[in-house]
Amino acid sequence: MILQALYSYYQRLLEDPDIEIPLQGTSRENISFALVLTPDGILVDVEDLRLQEGKKKRPRKLTVPAWPGKRASGIKANFLWDNTAYVLGEDDKGKPKRVRECQQAFREQVEHFCANSGDPALEAILHFLSANQGNSIKERDDWSEISGTNLVFRLDGVPGFIHDRPAAMIAWDNCRSASGSDKQGQCLIEGSMQSLARLHPALKGVQGGQSTGVSLVAFNKKSFESYGKTQSFNAPVGQRAAFAYATALNYLLARDSRQKVRIGDMTMVFWAERENPAESFLADFFEPPTEEEVLPESANDAVTSMKIRDLLLAIRKGTQVVDIVPDLDSSVHFYLLGLTPNAARLSIRYWEHDSLDNILSRIGRHFRDIAIVRQFDNEPEFPPLWRLLLQTAAMGKSENILPVLSGGMARAMLSGTRYPDSLLPVILGRIRSDGIVNYFRAALLKGYLVRNRNMEVSMALDTQRTDRAYILGRLFAVLEKAQEDAIPNTGATIKDKYLASASATPGLVFHILLKNSAHHIAKLRKDPEKKNWAYGYDKKIQEIMNKLDDFPKTLKAEEQGLFMIGYYHQRKDFFTKKNEEK
């Protein structure tokens, strides 16, 4: 199903005149320099093709002849382009024997298929290779930038690159035909009998994957072959179909793709079965714009950001989005594919296909479930998934996010399933570790309790709620605030010492906390400017205590989550009232 969907997407891309998509036998590769030659093969210049990106330069993407599959440890020359080891016989890796073998393979391939072509550009390359001018390039001042990069050829005074010339394309077709697979079989994608692909094209752009590319379909051991079938017949994909699905996936994984998002260690791509406006902004649902970002420098960007926020508000309310984007066909099917690297292969972490309407309704439910009052006004009303996941990681680093958790959160958001069962203990563990109950963690706790435990949790403080865990959380927040007002600028509050134990074993802790709070309130009464605060805290503590029969010895994990939400709500309410008074 995945390969068929990608194959169909490639056919759709071919029909779009505004999209430059490689044809079979080619690929989009990183090219840094062009060797400019005279008709006699004399090197006159090394043209820098790299693009300036900030203070750095990055290679330019060019369509070049390409073999199927990726080049591993063996020697296999690309046609009329390659890195400096193949083209020049020079690099800085300290393996002279291998470099000579690489250059020999490149030269023999060109001589075999380009000799007697009658094309002056191809003859120029032949002259260049026979003259062995790699040493002269190595003496250049910018050799350190050239070494190891990919090179193409250009004929001096002639626009375009030599590998794009008609004679070069004919020579490449002959080269491919001579190296074609002799294994015939029924392609599982196209259904016809054809030459099967032994090696599938490499896929690049997956976070954490090898820079040379990884494979989605690959066999390199007998144990991976079932029922005595060899690699080609175990996964019979024709050469055309293998090229098509890999090219479509590489297009989605491209550096500047708007149809790719990263969630933890997972790279997710998405596409529609036919052209749809949602393809250009679905990524924003994973990282929605904030209020400040709806007024960027570009007027078009401002309109787009406002439209995305309006869409998010609409789907969170559960209303239709057709009024906001009139040409949005919500019945069109979308495909979502989550990938993670596994050595030289890809693991499929997530796969979902459904109508856009269903996907948007699930995303809206996710934002409804986690919706909670913000701690600060500059925090995002629609928290990005990656920021939520950072709250589960040690030291807040993305590399510490649990892979199973990131995949489970993405699945819950897009499929409407339960949040991972590990979410609650992980969040509670992080709170015990650093004592921080912030907006993002409170949102995750609320979402878990609402979806996984079918609890009703309000966005803001609910003074009528009678759950003892919620009330205990409120009480702890009041006691902490009384201490902060009685002892300003204290180095540590009761939160730093007692938050974890108060939420887990309130029966052992709250008697101590209440005894200490009596001293704090007594200190406030002695201060003429703060004595009214003391009466306020006494009243607030009494109101909360009236809803409690006793202090339970222990609280379950979900009750500890509700305790943290009550604590967060009460803390937010204190500062909200102060802001309103000001």
Image (tube, rainbow, N blue to C red):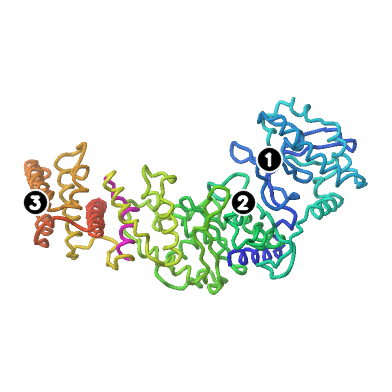
Identify residue for label 1: 50
Give the x, y percent position of residue 207: 53, 48
Q: CA distance from mark 2 to mark 3?
A: 76 Å
Identify residue for label 2: 220
Magenta run includes residue 447: yes
Q: Amino acid at mark 1?
A: Arg
Q: Secondary structure at mark 2?
A: loop
Circle nearer the N terminus (2, 3):
2
Q: Nearer the viewer, mark 3 or mark 1?
A: 1
Q: Horizontally, is 41 left or right of 563 in the view? A: right
Give the x, y percent position of residue 52: 64, 40
Q: Nearer the viewer, residue 297 or 108?
A: 108
Circle nearer the N terminus (2, 1):
1
Q: Nearer the viewer, mark 2 or mark 3?
A: 2
Specify few, some or many for label 1: CA neighbours under 10 Å numbering under 14, 14-19, or 20 or more: some
Q: Horizontally, is 145 left or right of 483 in the view? A: right
Residue visible at 75% across and 45% down? 78
Identify residue for label 3: 535
Q: Nearer the viewer, residue 479 or 487?
A: 479
Q: Which residues are magenta?
A: 435-450
Regarding residue 314, the answer to whether it shows in the image is no
Q: CA distance from mark 3 to mark 1?
A: 70 Å
Total numbered badges shown on the rendered structure: 3
The dominant secondary structure in magenta is helix
Give the x, y percent position of residue 122: 87, 43
Image quadrant where one finds the N terminus = bottom right
Magenta run includes residue 5: no
Q: Nearer the viewer, mark 2 or mark 1?
A: 2
Residue visible at 82% across and 45% down? 162
Q: Amino acid at mark 3?
A: Tyr
Circle nearer the N terminus (3, 1):
1
